[in-house]
Each structure stands twice: as structure tokens, then as C-alpha cells.
Amino acid sequence: MRTKAKVIALSEKGAVVETERTSACEGCHKNEDGKGCSVCSLMGGDRNFSALAENEVGARVGDTVIIETETQRVLWYAVLVFLMPLIAAGLAFAVGYFCRMQAPMQALLSIVAFVACFIGLFVYSKTLQKKRFDVRITEIVQTADLEKTETHP
């Protein structure tokens, strides 16, 4: 997956880039005012997303760049975030059922498993974030060239 981003800071590890969640916001009915959509509200109320990116091309603060993430990795994260908590809750409910727990206890066990899965994913994400880059800068786009391509197709 490729998109445009802006370098907002540099660190010893790489560059901090910021991009807009345009694909998530385009189809949302709550994005009529252009300030954000339902997804943005869930993600903290901002259409902008920042990430630490591998900076092998030497981008500097203020540069507009093309960033890339592996599609396979993005899909894997989607499976982890959307399916794993549901699977954990379903398994917990099944364990409660086979252990002959009462329905309220089965439901409580499912809720605990659901929340615990998100906590585990949060810890996994923070640990993984320190070990590898999920985003890398592939090229620097000159501002003048960007304006020419946008105004003259």
C-alpha cells in the first residue's frame, strides 16, 4: 500500500510521518463537513495518522514523501484487531458452556476474554513497534513537482 505523507520529525530510529486517512473517510456519511468520520472518531477524532517510518532515502522535516506498507502485514493487523477478540470471546463462552457455568458467568467470561485480547494486542503492538518498521519511505516528492502533477494532468 502506497500513499503520500509529510515528514513532521526525525529521530535516531527514522522519520515520523503524518498522512490523512482518506480511504477510511471517503465513504463515511459523517464526513460531510470534511472534518472526520466515524472511524476518525473511534481513532481519537483526527483524520491525520502519524507513524515512525524507515528513512533510507534521507527525507528531512517538511518533505512530502511516498510511504509504503506491505499489504499482507496490514491485512494481518486487521485480522488481529477485528477477528481475534471475537474468537477469544466465542471460545471463552464455549468453555463456560462446557464447564456448565450459568449464562451470566459465561457472558462475563466472554467479556473478560474480549477485553483481555485487546490488552494483549496493545502490548503486542507496543513491543513490535520497538523491533521493526511497518512503514518505510520509498521516495521524496518535490513540492514543485507535486503541484505541477496536481494542476496539470
Image (tube, rainbow, N blue to C red):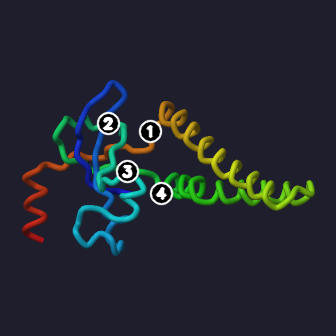
Which label number is shown at residue 71? 4
Q: Nearer the viewer, residue 149 or 129?
A: 129
Q: Residue at x 26, y 54 (%)?
A: 4
- Left or right of 112 on screen, residue 37: left
- Give the distance between the C-alpha atoms of the residues marked 1 and 2, in whole angstroms: 10 Å
Residue, x 54% and y 57% (percent of image)?
A: 78
Which is more N-terminal, label 2 or label 1?
A: 2
Asked if 98 appears above or below 12 in the picture, the reply is below
Q: Amino acid at mark 4?
A: Thr
Disc 1 marks which residue?
133
Apparent side of residue 123 relative to residue 63 in the rendered image (left or right): right
Q: Secondary structure at mark 1?
A: loop
Residue type beneath disc 1 = Phe
Please say if the residues under marks 2 and 4 sit with CB atoms less than 8 Å apart: no
Tell me if mark 1 has few (under 14), some (14-19) or many (20+) residues whose alpha carbon lies within 10 angstroms of its own. some
Do tag 1 and tag 2 residues touch (Cβ < 8 Å)? Answer: no
- Residue 113 in percent (x, y) is at 71, 49
Residue denoted by label 3: 44
Q: To which residue does mark 2 refer? A: 55
Q: Earlier in the sequence, mark 3 or mark 2?
A: 3
Q: Which amino acid, mark 2? A: Asn
**Earlier sequence position, callout 4 versus callout 1:** 4
Between the C-alphas of marks 4 and 1, the distance is: 14 Å
Provide the secondary structure element on which disc 4 rests.
Answer: helix
Question: Residue at the location (31% across, 53% down)?
Answer: 46
For marks 2 and 4, the one nearer the N-term is: 2
Amino acid carrying label 3: it is: Gly
**Are there few (<14), some (14-19), or many (20+) residues within 10 Å of tag 4?**
few
